[in-house]
Amino acid sequence: MKKDFSPTILDFGSVEFIISRHFGFCYGVENAIEKSYKAINENPDKTIYLLSQMIHNPEVNRDLQEQGVQFIQDTQGNQLIEWDRINSEDIVIIPAFGATVETKQLLEEKNITFDQYNTTCPFVEKVWNRSAKLGKDDHTVIIHGKKNHEETKATFSHSKETSPSIVIKDLKEAQIIADFIHGTIDASAFFEVFQENCSDGFDPEIHFNKVGVVNQTTMLASETQEIADFMKQTMTKKYGQNNIKLHFADTRDTLCYATNDNQSATLELLNVEADLAVVIGGYNSSNTTHLVELLEDKFKTFFIKTKDEIMSADEVHAFDIHKKQVKRHMGFLPKKDKIKLIITSGASCPDATVDAVIQRILDLTNAPISIDNIDL
């Protein structure tokens, strides 16, 4: 059945919220948070570590730290706590993004059991399994992702165990691969771009004979599909339509349903009329950033992490995804009898945070209808 991605409308008189049909926590995030708090409750006398941030949400991570959880690395992989301080008596939680093969081997060498509190998202593991199958069938794995993102690092680490692997960030980089396949650039030009993004021993002369595309699950699903379609066209042009199944693997089944649904619901928002859009989530959240990208094509869009960034009806402090900084904006809420405001959030944003933003805006607009009286 075709899914209904039409938004929900909540009319409070002075402001009408147009709320995305799908937003907020996905299964992988809920599972990760649940297991993390289970680890805290079950081990009151032990030191508990997380490999890095549980998810890209500052409120969730702050709460875990307040519960005594310590982060071993930051989101860029910089060491915050040296490994020699961690021993077999400690608890180490693997976050939703997963962990590299090398990190897991290090934990095993230190006799640290991590399976009980391994919160790796099952859809991330699905990508790893698909990559392994591609490698078994002698395919090279092209990973659409951000090379410094924890999930992409983990996926690349697992993929290169069984397959020649390469990370690309967008269609432009896929075009460079196509240029090499078609012979318009040589290996030296190829490695100028991809030297640090390839597995050891990668040989473009050999390893682009058979390819498959997988992704960091929080990337734009439509962009991953566009890259996969482009690579299929490239291989068809090189080897012919009759031979395409020998050279290209269909991997669309690795796209995360939650990311896809959130993005599809956001695209549906582009069919409505509104005065502005508010997107809520962690500023380093990849999937939330993509929601902002989609909405800002049509609407004046503000990316905030909590209600605290809304200073007044006229002022908001929002994150600029292009300049990577928080900027002060005046003229936040338009001065009119009824404001139409789109609202959505990323997969790592708690519903309570969204509720608080809605209540903050209701207070600032002196809404005549209370949230307690709205017909949901």
Image (cartoon, grey):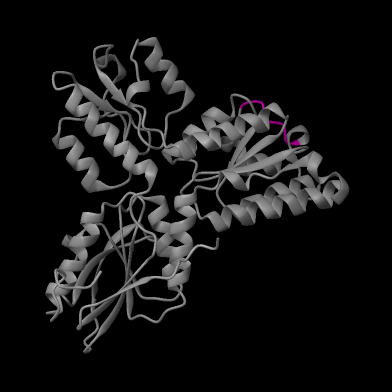
Q: Magenta span has 203?
A: yes
Say whether residue 53 is visible: no
Between 4 and 43, the one nearer to me in the picture: 4
Q: Magenta span has 277?
A: no
Image vertical order of residue 90 relative to residue 287, above or below = above
The quadrant of the image that shows the N terminus is bottom right
**Residue at 33% of width from left, 22% of height from top?**
116
**Residue at 81% of width from left, 39% of height from top?**
246
Between 72 and 259, the one nearer to me in the picture: 259
Occupied quadrant, residue 341: bottom left
Q: Horizontal placement of 254 versus 249: left or right?
A: left
Q: Horizontal placement of 87 versus 253: left or right?
A: left
The quadrant of the image that shows the C terminus is bottom left
Q: Position of residue 27 (x, y in %)?
A: 38, 44
- Which is the main secondary structure of the residues drawn in magenta? loop
- Which residue is farthest bottom? 337
Q: Position of residue 317 (x, y in %)?
A: 23, 65
Q: Position of residue 236 (x, y in %)?
A: 81, 50
**Residue at 60% of width from left, 35% of height from top?**
130
Q: Position of residue 11 (x, y in %)?
A: 25, 78
- Which residues are the magenta region? 200-204
Image vertical order of residue 110 relative to residue 335, above or below = above
Occupied quadrant, residue 149: top left
Image vertical order of residue 29 relative to residue 22, above or below = above
**Residue at 49% of width from left, 45% of height from top?**
217
Between 299 and 118, the one nearer to me in the picture: 118
Image vertical order of residue 50 relative to residue 371, above or below = above
